[in-house]
Amino acid sequence: MAQEYDYLFKTIVVGDGGVGKTALTIRFSKGIFTEDYKMTIGVDFHVKTISIEIDEGLITCKLQVWDTGGEERFGSIRPMYYQGSLGAILVFDLTNYASFEHLLKWIEEVRTNIKFEIPLLLVGNKSDLPDQRAISMEEINQFAKDFNLYYIETSAKTGKRVDDCFYVLTCLMAGLDIAEIKLRL
Ligand code: G3D
Ligand code: MG
């Protein structure tokens, strides 16, 4: 039987508890936002196949998105979820400054647990709450520049740019030129 995808990518979603990792993962994989899912304990993974158009045709990528529990008490079981990850989404909450400050810790955790360089995508979630915004664009841009990260602002609630964020990470994992991708977004 022919394989129905060109690539299989394991992707992890990391960041503090409450930033919206589960909401983003569910929005992307199922296209919905629900207020009543339980706090993630350990890990869940969701699968979705996306197609990327390149000059030579379509590339089909199957994403396995692992939604990790961000809470400290899951720390000891978390490392095994990093195994085999080819990309990571680093999420903070645009309305919570501490979640932004903790990004460094998350980058270190990814780098400690994954011995080779993988693409990281920085995501500021809850863009639907502009009045509660706690981090300036300057600060975010500086951070993204310092760590050489591509940055996207999403709302899991409205769905805004959620697909774009997984699409961009997939392109990075597939080794496609980000400048080219930008033009297509
Ligand atoms: P986590 O998986 O990172 O711990 P969750 O975070 O996905 O469980 O989300 C934490 C809370 O933030 C949830 O609210 C969820 O509904 C809310 N949330 C997630 N994404 C968004 C978003 O884009 N916009 C808004 N306004 N809220 C969001 P509760 O009330 O259940 O704690
Ligand atoms: Mg969760």
Image (cartoon, rainbow, N blue to C red):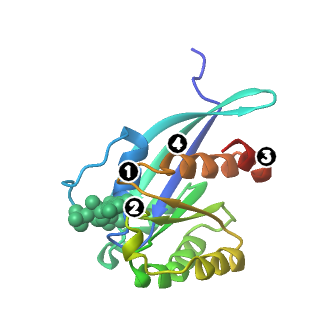
Q: Secondary structure at mark 1?
A: loop
Mark 4 to mark 2 CA distance (whole Å)? 26 Å
Hey, which quadrant is residue 5 in on the image?
top right
Q: Is residue 40 left or right of residue 91?
A: left
Residue 83 point in image, percent of width and height: 52, 59
Hey, which quadrant is residue 184 in on the image?
top right
Mark 2 to mark 3 CA distance (whole Å)? 28 Å
Q: Residue at x 49, y 85 (%)?
A: 101
Mark 1 to mark 3 CA distance (whole Å)? 27 Å
Mark 2 to mark 1 CA distance (whole Å)? 7 Å
Are the residues tagged 1 and 3 within 8 Å (C-beta)?
Answer: no
Q: Nearer the viewer, mark 4 or mark 2?
A: 2
Q: Earlier in the sequence, mark 4 or mark 1?
A: 4
**Residue named by callout 4:** 63
* Amino acid type, residue under disc 3 in the picture: Glu
Q: Residue at x 42, y 57 (%)?
A: 155
**Residue named by callout 3:** 180
For label 4, being within 8 Å of ligand 1 is answered no
Are the residues tagged 2 and 1 within 8 Å (C-beta)?
Answer: yes
**Residue named by callout 1:** 158
Mark 4 to mark 1 CA distance (whole Å)? 22 Å
Q: Secondary structure at mark 2?
A: loop
For the residue carrying disc 1, how many other residues have a C-alpha within 10 Å: few (<14), some (14-19), or many (20+)? some
Ligand 1 is found in the corner quadrant, namely bottom left
Q: Earlier in the sequence, mark 4 or mark 3?
A: 4
Q: Secondary structure at mark 4?
A: strand
Residue 90 point in image, percent of width and height: 52, 66
Q: Is residue 134 left or right of residue 107?
A: left
Q: Is residue 81 left or right of residue 121?
A: left
For label 1, being within 8 Å of ligand 1 is answered yes
* Amino acid type, residue under disc 2 in the picture: Asp
